[in-house]
Amino acid sequence: MSLLQAIIFSALAVPLTATAQATYKCTENGKSVYSDKPCGRTAKVLAVGESAEEKERLRQAARDRQRAAEAMAAAVAEARRENAARPAPRDLRAERRAEPSLEEYCNGLLKKAKSAKDEAAMYRYHQGLIDDAKRRQKEAEDEHFSKCYGTVR
């Protein structure tokens, strides 16, 4: 929006907000009647929001808003106190990742033993590497037997 458009808009908006319609209160046959035009000799001009009923209604609405805001603040404070007293939730997914199940552990030992066996077969003329691979294979198989005996392969 350009500066000129903003000036024109504000110039048009000011007269619209500055003019307020008058409201008239008349009493006819013991009943109060409100109108935007004078309705008789007993017509009284009321400005918008000037009646005692309107003022009381606005005061009551303000009190209600204040009570609601205080109740909301109290509820938030109570919820924060409860949350502070509660222990932090456990991250079960992280725990599952950290501790593999027995089946996963046993399968890992079998893979380790097979990898060491394949490595031993790969070396033909280097007896030190062959012996090392066979030692690792035997360790994995022994651990599998002692910790996973009776599990399904």
Image (cartoon, rainbow, N blue to C red):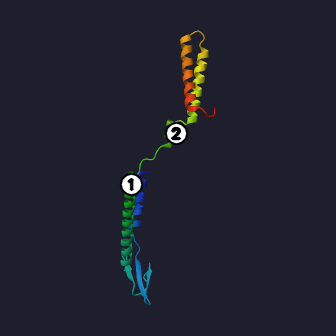
State the residue lying farthest toward the bottom: 29
Q: Nearer the viewer, residue 100 or 57?
A: 100
* Residue type (three-letter) at the residue carrying disc 1: Arg
Secondary structure found at label 2: helix
The spot of residue 120 in percent (x, y) is 59, 16
Identify the residue under disc 1: 80
Which residue is located at x 42 percent, y 47 percent?
88
Foreground residue among 47 and 57: 57
Figure check: 111 above or below 8: above
**How many numbered dots are placed on residues in this image?**
2
Residue beneath the point at 38% across and 51% down: 84
- The extreme top residue here reads 125
The residue drawn where x is 41% and y is 74% is 21
Q: Residues within 10 Å of mark 1 (few under 14, many from 20)?
A: few
Q: Quadrant of the C terminus?
A: top right
Q: Residues within 10 Å of mark 2 (few under 14, many from 20)?
A: few
User: In terms of secondary structure, where does tag 1 sit?
Assistant: helix
Give the image location of residue 75, x and y in percent.
39, 60
Lower position in the chain sequence, tag 1 or tag 2:
1
Q: x, y percentage for residue 42?
A: 39, 87
Please name the amino acid that badge 2 sits on: Arg
* Residue bearing the label numbered 2: 96
Label 1 vs label 2: CA separation? Answer: 30 Å
Which quarter of the picture shows residue 7? Answer: bottom left
| Comparing labels 1 and 2, the label whose residue is closer to the camera | 2
Which is more toward the observer, 122 or 3?
A: 122
Q: Which residue lies at the image location 58% right of the left edge and 25% below the top edge?
A: 141
